[in-house]
Amino acid sequence: MEGSLGFLFLAFLIIPLPNFFIFCTGHSHSQLRCIDTERHALLTFKQDLIDPLNRLSSWTVDGDCCHWLGVVCHNLTAHGSLGFLFLAFLIIPLPNFFIFCTGHSHSQLRCIDTERHALLTFKQDLIDPLNRLSSWTVDGDCCHWLGVVCHNLTAHVHQLHLRSFPPPIWDDLMDEEQNWAQEEAYSRSMFGGKLNPSLLDLKHLNYFDLSFNNFSASPIPSFLGSMKSLTSLNLSNAGFVGVIPHQLGNLSNLNYLDLSYNDFSSTPIPSFLGIMSNLTHLDLSNAGFVGLIPHQLGNLSNLHFLNLESFSYSGLYVNNLEWLSGLPLLQHLDMSFVNLSKASDWLQLTNTLPSLLELRLSDCQLPFIPLVVDVHNMTSLRHLDLFGNNFNSSISNWLYSFSRLEFLNLGNSNLQGTISSSIGNLSSLTNLDFSNNQFNGTLPQNFGQLKNLVELSFLYNSISGPIPVSFGNLSSLTYLDFSNNQFNGTLPQNFGQLKNLVRLDFWNNSISGSLPVSFGNLQSLTYLDLSSNQFNGTLPQSFGNLQSLTYLDLSSNQFNGTLPQSFGRLSKLDTLYIDSNKLKGVVSKVHFDNLTSLRTLTASGNQLTLKASQNWIPPFQLESLSLQSWNLGPKFPQWLCSQRRMVILDLSYTQISDMAPPSFWNLSSQFQYLNLSHNLIHGEIPNSPVMLSTLVIDLSSNHFKGPLPYISSNVYMLDLSNNSFSRSISHFFCFRVNETKNIEHLNLQKNLLSGIIPDCLMNWNNLKVLNLGNNNFSGSIPASMGSLTYLHSLHLYDNKFFGKLPSSLKNCEELVIIDVAENRFAGNIPSWIGHRCTSLMVLSLRSNNFHGHIPKELCALTSLQILDLSHNKLSGSIPRCIKNFRAMATTNISNDLNSYRHTITYGDYLPLESALLVIKGSIREYNTILQLVKCIDFSKNNLSGEIPKEVTSLQELQSLNLSCNLLIGSIPENIGTMGSLESIDFSLNQLSGQIPSSMSNLTFLNHLNLSNNNLTGKIPLSTQLQSLNPSSFVGNKLCGPPLTVNCTTNGVKPNNENIRSKAIGGLEVDWFYVSMALSFVVGFWSVCGTLLLNKQWRIMYFQFLDHMGYKLTGVVSL
């Protein structure tokens, strides 16, 4: 009896239920009409129903209710009574039909003892941290246990659902702590341990799911291959490793196999999978397989789903794809990150799959995209992903022929050219990604035909022109990303019609004009980025309507006017960037009234003034605040002390001229970045390392005074420069002397600090930048400075240090800048500088007491760009190996003075390197262009000998100063090849000969001083030389412009009066002109003084003048 009713049950499943009555009686349903009373009852029933979509439109007064939607009549009587039975079949779950047919209740069945025992044994070897299997007890019914499904008739265990449930992908709406809490909860819930072979006693098990667990890098047990009743096996994300056991090939009934996201590293995909002919679903993705994909997979003729996606370029490849032709039922194919570079016919072979709905071939190294191909067999395609292939071509026209295509991703594929108007043929598209390509030209107007489009991205292309007005027709659009293109013009006024937009990103284009007022209609927007464009005008008040916004970036535009008060209505706003605009005016607490969700506010680079009372308490708790260049002063803003979550704070250039309250310093321990620089904040900093534990601290250019504060070992960057800190720094460096400091950047320049540098720098060995310049330090450099082995930049200029440079500094092999100018160092220049500091780019020893020769070892510094040895007592000749300074000779060496910023934690916040240089006769500080400066200064020493001709090989040198030495000989003839020279100073030497004619080739030269040498001859003619001041040539025997001395045909006209005399300060005295002035004074007063003193002579002199006047008048009249 049970068997026969089972057959009857199958009939109900196979034959459509309404027609089952026809099958029993042989009558046709069309011969009957419904009973009038029953039709009336149904119409009355309809009257009281609410039917928003008018689904019961077929229920009309004169209609046949047996044909109405949702009504089933008896095939003999036309009564609706048996329709109840039909509904019952729909309502009662089909597995319980056995109960209906046989009268047996599920509660009367209990699981098989042997299977319960097998499950309990299996449980013993599992690690179950959260005791999820607490229901698995010795005396329990295993059919009621968690994860166990039994057959409703036989009570055999048919299914085991033992997967764990990972949290969703990182949720941006939750904070980091909440996301990590979810991750931790998931890791605690995972099963572990090992799989016990007792599962073999589950002879009727057909479904086994162990996914998303952690079996501690153990291999898949081979006994699973003996569970031949299995039809579905899911071991994905379960932590299995090693080789897949060949016994799995015995699972001939298996139609679902998922081994994805395990670690079968360095093993090939097993070919035996090709004999599992009943498989319809095979997922081997991201499991670490390598090698050739076996062609035997082409034997799986029943396969509907195949996923071979690999880890990024991990080593899976094919020689061809011919085996795909054996998979005629395939609907989903994913081979992302598989190397298909040899599969030149990839498109022709995928075109042989008539059932294909999804094709994912991203990052497959496809060799090209065919320009012409017939894709008529792929008309069913819904999803095409070719992201990350280097096609290096334009879009082929066949791609526009998939009228049913819903998803198209061609991002990052090196596609070029313009977008064809044929794009309008893809009328079913919902997702289109053309990002990271080289598309140019304008977008066609018929983009507006893609009315089903939900997501569109042209990120990182070169699309230009205005945004088509037709985009206003894309009413289904939720995601639009045009960032980093060349769009220009203004935004279409109809943009406000895109009321479903959730994310809009136009970052880094050239869009101009004001924002349309209709922007306020985009009330679904949660993310809006219009930064780095040329928008101008005032911000519309309608912004206040965008009350779903969580992220708003309007930075780096030209918005002007005031900040609209309607911003205060954006209660969900989390992040606001309005920096680098031209906003002016007053911002009050009204602007912030409802910004209760605000966490990030960056508004620097505007001219806004915040007016809020000292007792104002904002409604938000900020994590990041940047108000650089606002007017917050003169009082220190007390409301900052209410911000208990603040991590980043930048109040630089905000006109604060007050003391920071103690409550603020107590708050500072929570900061990661603190910048109060360029204000007039005064007072002392509390001396507590707990307070100054911020990772990046910039308090430079204020009026802080007193001793240096202690700092925590957690600080990475500290800038206290340009203040009035005073006294010794011993307590600063020696605080907790045995504790390793993390600090990498320390700038204490331009203060009033004094005393010696203590010898306790051993635990400051993470320092990369140390700047102690322009203070009053004295004494010698401690040997412990040599322990700063990561030091990149050392500035000790303008102090009173003396003694020799310690040899321990040779350990600082990564030094790029050494600046010890304007001190009292003595001794020879250490030769180890050339041997050990091979990366040196700046070496400044100016104004010290170094003596001896310039060591030839310095010539090994091929990266050197700035060498200043001026104002010392050096002697000997200039080394000829100077030509080895390759960075001064060529532009091919790409050095980076600030490269350390990329290796320092929070390096982006650090200032650029700077140095004081004497160029063109004046001293100035270089920072932003220091990287580009190349100069040599050996002036004011006792160097002798000739200028080596090798110096002319330094063709990128911009400044050369050899003045005030004892150099002899002539100026190198080829000096004109040094085409980058802007400044030359050879004055106050003993150079002789003529000025080389090649010097006229120095077109960039704008400062030249050759005065006070023994040069002779004519000054070469050139625009540059003749435009220079004549003082550049005095004190020689030169002639020609710009000097007034003319040149004779035989050479130089003698000029014995032009005797050289120049003071140390550079003042010149030409006695010829002095004597002329004196002669004029003496002659004038000799005549005029006599006339003034002697009346008789004065009368005779004027009579003489009158007589001469009459004579001249007579001559003229004749």
Image (cartoon, helix red, strand yellow):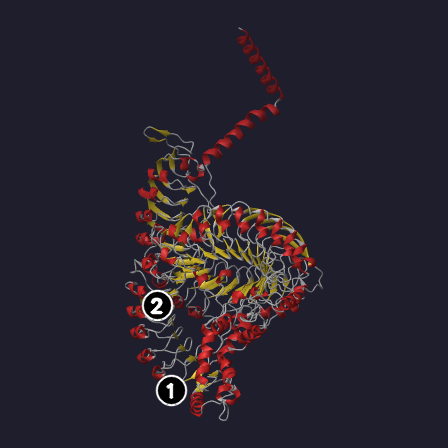
Q: Three-letter amino acid code at disc 2?
A: Ser
Q: Secondary structure at mark 2?
A: loop
Q: Identify which residue, 249 or 594, lies in the foreground.
A: 249
The image shows residue 798 at horizontal and vertical percentages of: 50, 58
The residue furthest left is 319
Q: Three-letter amino acid code at disc 1?
A: Leu
Question: Of label 1 and label 2, which has the lower sequence position?
Answer: 1
Q: Secondary structure at mark 1?
A: helix
Q: Check the image and report above or below for 708 versus 937.
A: below
Quadrant containing the N terminus is: bottom left
In the picture of the structure, the residue carrying the numbered disc 1 is 200
Q: Can you tell which quarter of the image residue 566 is in?
A: bottom right
**429 sits left or right of 342 in the view:** right
What is the distance, in whole Å, between disc 1 and disc 2 at their CAs?
35 Å
The residue furthest bottom is 139
Mark 1 residue crowding within 10 angstroms, few (<14) / some (14–19) / many (20+):
some
- Label count reads 2
Q: Can you tell which quarter of the image residue 233 is in?
A: bottom left
Q: Check the image and report above or below for 754 versus 12.
A: above
Residue 739 appearing in the image: yes
Q: Identify which residue, 374 or 107, lies in the foreground.
A: 107
The image shows residue 493 at horizontal and vertical percentages of: 58, 47
Q: Identify which residue, 964 or 383, lies in the foreground.
A: 383
In the picture of the structure, the residue carrying the numbered disc 2 is 314
Mark 2 residue crowding within 10 angstroms, few (<14) / some (14–19) / many (20+):
some
Q: Check the image and report above or below for 319 versus 261.
A: above
The image shows residue 359 at horizontal and vertical percentages of: 39, 62
